[in-house]
Image (spheres, rainbow, N blue to C red):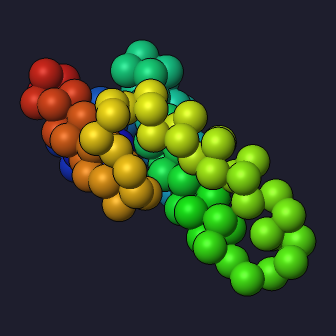
Amino acid sequence: MASERSKCMPILLYAVEACPLLARQTLSFEFTLTRIFMKLFSVKSQILFRAASFLQKFTVSENSLCMLFASDARRQLHNIFIQFGDNIQTARQLRNAFFLLNSLISYSCC
């Protein structure tokens, strides 16, 4: 979504600059547009990346409670990775896949 923010958002917000808006109203408007883009392009990258990062750390934790649920966390992590192809094995690879997807979206968007 950073690509859209740097390229598409200025274009969409251009006319808004003529209106007297508070900074929080501009941020609210930008948030709304970002959510629309996320729904249009089915991009949930930040949420999935954060979940994958958390689950990856969870599975290697030495905490006894984490160890108890580690197999379930591995299964959920695998389900996240499999959505983006068989070659995704880590949260870092998932982030790189999102970066590539966002680059393609921003290229087609603007």
Q: Residue 101 at x, y = what percent?
A: 25, 35
Give the side of residue 108 with respect to residue 39, left or right.
left
The percent position of residue 77, horizontal first and vertical second, equals 58, 47
Query: Relative to 61, is 49 above or below?
Result: above
**Extreme bottom residue here?**
62
Determine the residue positioned at 85% across, 64% down: 68
Image quadrant occupied by the C terminus: top left
Can residue 85 be seen in this snapshot?
A: yes
User: Horizontal placement of 71 versus 24: left or right?
Assistant: right
Q: Is residue 90 above or below residue 21?
A: below
Q: Nearer the viewer, residue 10 or 53?
A: 53
Residue at (82%, 58%) from the top-left corner?
69
19 or 1: nearer the viewer:
1
Percent across and percent down for residue 58 are: 68, 67
Q: Quadrant of residue 107?
A: top left
**Location of residue 87 by image quarter:** top left
> Is residue 9 something one can see in this rendering?
no
Total labels drawn: 0
| Residue drawn at (38%, 51%) of the image | 89
Residue for point 73% across, 60% down = 70
Quarter of the picture holding the N terminus: top left
Q: Furthest-top residue in view?
A: 40
Which quarter of the picture shows residue 75? Answer: top right
- Image position, residue 24 (x, y; %): 58, 54
84 or 101, which lies in front? 84
Q: Nearer the viewer, residue 6 or 75?
A: 75
